[in-house]
Image: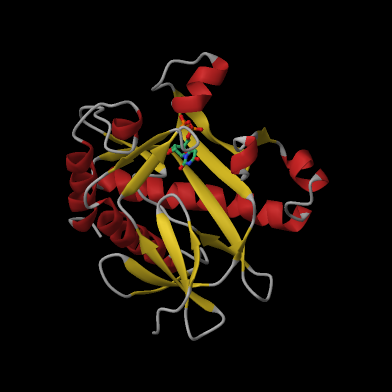
Amino acid sequence: MLKGEQLYEGKAKKVFKTDDPELLIVSYKDDATAFNGLKKGTIAGKGVINNRMSNLLMQMLEKKGVPTHFVQELDDRDTVVKRVTIVPLEVIVRNIAAGSFSKRYGVEEGVVFDTPTIEFSYKNDALGDPLLNTYHALALKLATPAEIDTIKALSFKINEALKAFWAECGVTLVDFKLEFGRLFDGTVVLADEISPDTCRLWDSATGEKLDKDRFRRDLGGVEDAYEQVMSRLLSHI
Ligand code: UDP
């Protein structure tokens, strides 16, 4: 697979064209940002872990009937994915109160919900990714009603699969962010990544944070946490 012209450089990944118009190569970087790009840093080895972890989890989800953009891992940092147009919605699924939910609603972090929640943000850096409801998403023509139904159903299905998988690894899936894309034929598939950058993962026994919150909140041991969740995943996949 030929790595062609760079199409785009995001906060954590670069995207390249290939010789096939329906395929792209994503290349995972060690760069880390938080608070809408205000905090910047590097997490050594993060790109390698996120590439491998996201690919393994997406392959696990495919086996359970969730369509994803994953095609083939090329090397440590590079993966071939199906070309999609990203639906400009950040989909957040939560099992336990944390982060912006705790802050917004005044709920202590760690409160377990009876049923998972879902929320959407408008994926728009200039506006700071504002929270929106599905009526707003329709008014803004970000997605069709059918696409929103598909995205909700897939997101809850993904939550059940990931929650069960991480539980086997002794890790509690607190919340996570998903992005979806449309293939050339309009099919909605899971895109972007699933990694400690995009999930809150707590050690089930100790409650220790094993994700990007260590970077966001200057807790130290960031690299160790990423390596820890990766090795737990590898021993259960
Ligand atoms: N998240 C993400 N990208 C974002 C915002 C959130 O990957 O731009 C993830 C985050 O890692 C967490 C979940 O989505 O697992 C919920 O994040 P929250 O809304 O609590 O926001 P935060 O506290 O991270 O600002």
The answer, for residue 20, to whether it is visible in the render is yes
Q: Percent x, y for residue 219?
A: 25, 26
Q: Is residue 211 above or below residue 98?
A: below
Which quadrant: the N terminus? bottom left
Q: Position of residue 159 (x, y in %)?
A: 47, 47
Identity of the residue drawn at 64% across and 34% down: 130
In the image: residue 184, left or right of residue 21? right
- Residue 61 seen anywhere in this rendered image of the structure: no
Q: Quadrant of the C terminus?
A: bottom left
49 or 32: nearer the viewer: 32
Residue 163 found in image quarter: top left
What residue is at 48 percent from the left and 52 percent from the top?
A: 158
In the picture provided, is 152 more to the left or to the right than 67? right
Number of numbered discs: 0
Q: Nearer the viewer, residue 216 or 114?
A: 216
Residue at 49% across, 35% down: 94
Q: Quadrant of residue 72?
A: bottom left
Q: Position of residue 67 (x, y in %)?
A: 52, 67
- Residue lying furthest right in this view? 139
Give the answer, above or below, for where 92 lies relative to 96: below
Q: Is residue 223 left or right of residue 129?
A: left
> Nearest the camera: 144 or 173?
144
Q: Residue at x 20, y 49 (%)?
A: 232
Q: How is the image coloured?
A: secondary structure
> Can you say whether 108 is above or below 24 in the image?
above
Q: Position of residue 7 (x, y in %)?
A: 52, 68
**Furthest residue toward front:** 5
